[in-house]
Amino acid sequence: MPRWPTIAVMDLFVAAVDFASRIPETEEYRWERDFCWNLIAKTALDVGDHDVFRRARREVHGPRTQAELTARAILAVPALRSEFIEEIASRFDWYVQYLWRRTRYSLVNPMVELVGTAAAVALEQHIDDPHERIDWRVDIAEALANPAEQREVLVAAAESARSVPYAVGSAFALVVRGAARLGFFDEAGAWLEEIPDEEEREQTASYVSERRELWPAAPELKPRRFGEEDAERRYGVDQPAAEGKWVEAIAGVREDFPTRVCASVLAAPDRLLVELLLFQVDAVLSYHRNDLKLEYMVELWSACRARGVEVTPLESLRLALAGVPRTWGGGAGGRRGDADGAQLSGNRDGRPAKRDLPRPRSDVAR
């Protein structure tokens, strides 16, 4: 039996939600609130807590974040597609302003599936850039299963490309590449001749030739996973942890990841793990904004959940992080950053900075 106090893993996520709900609803804390609720919304989607996701999405004020969360729900959770795809389709003129272009194109497949080809094509009227409108049509063609329907949409896209008021060649290149991806090589060859710029025509022709050689098997593109950039740095933690060299692994966390959760060390002996967690809590608390605190809680909860850890020695973490979010005023000292008057500071990348003198009120949310 461990002699350290424990907290159920699920309680940590509940505490994180409660923590976010008590960040002040003022303009100076708007960025922090949006960051925290955005993180909670994404985590709730990952674990299938749709009620928490809906609440978190409502709490976010930034329009781009709201739009991206809605798209994420459609793309990641089939059970939520019908609920949110109708909203995007009915307010596409608003969503098209805030969705990143890549996200917008990712929505074509569910859009065609749930609202129909004609309705999806009609939405292009809300896209201002003519190249993007053509790209939208090509994506619709790729979302269809029937070759005749695919060709019909591509022909319409080619017709639109002829009317682009500038850079007709690049517009046709979009259509030609789409036709090649779908195996319409005769059409691609004909439309290729309508690209006026010789260099662009040669580059597009080369692409068509490559696709013809690969047809019908196209190479799979593996998306870059979040956190991949840390893989090499984390090797200095993960490798000794795998070998049971806990002192070396934990030293690596303290040096390189003082405020980030390294899942491989969660199997460390209780005493070493608690010492590390208390060190990290102190590092997190030295940061004067709320975003890092909630990010650490959610990261730790996610890592424990992924590894099947039922309980963790985190009562001190719960009391320290989920008690009261950092706010202005309060306490005897009334100093920046903490409700009890403690002076806190830190860098946005999560590495604690040395304590400094109080700054003007406006820097809390900036």
Image (tube, rainbow, N blue to C red):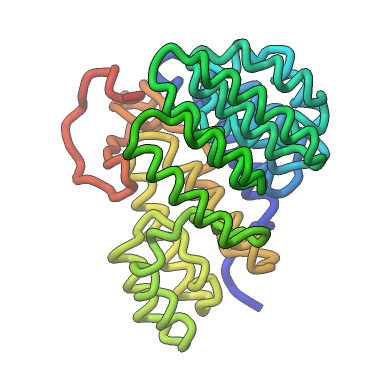
Residue 201 in picture, x, y percent from top left: 40, 39
Relative side of 156 to 193, left or right: right
Q: Looking at the image, which residue is at 70% across and 28% down? A: 153
Q: Is residue 268 above or below residue 233?
A: below
Picture coordinates of residue 306, whole percent (x, y):
64, 63
Q: 7 or 250, which lies in front?
A: 250
Identify which residue, 132 or 352, lies in the foreground. 132
| Residue that lies at the very extreme toward the left in this rendered image | 357
Q: Quadrant of residue 312?
A: bottom right
Instruction: Using the rendered image of the protein, determine whether residue 126 is visible from the camera's viewpoint.
Output: yes
Left or right of 33: which side holds 279? left
Q: Where, quadrant-wise, is the N terminus in this rendering? A: bottom right
| Residue found at x 56% / y 29% | 135
Residue at the image point whose x is 38% and y is 44% from the top? 202
| Of residues 37 and 120, the one drawn nearer to the viewer in this rendering | 120
Q: In the image, what residue occupies the spot 54% across and 37% down?
A: 176
Residue 96, quarter of the rendered image: top right
Q: Position of residue 191 (x, y in %)?
A: 54, 33
Res. 316 in view: no
Position of 299 with respect to 77 (left or right) is left
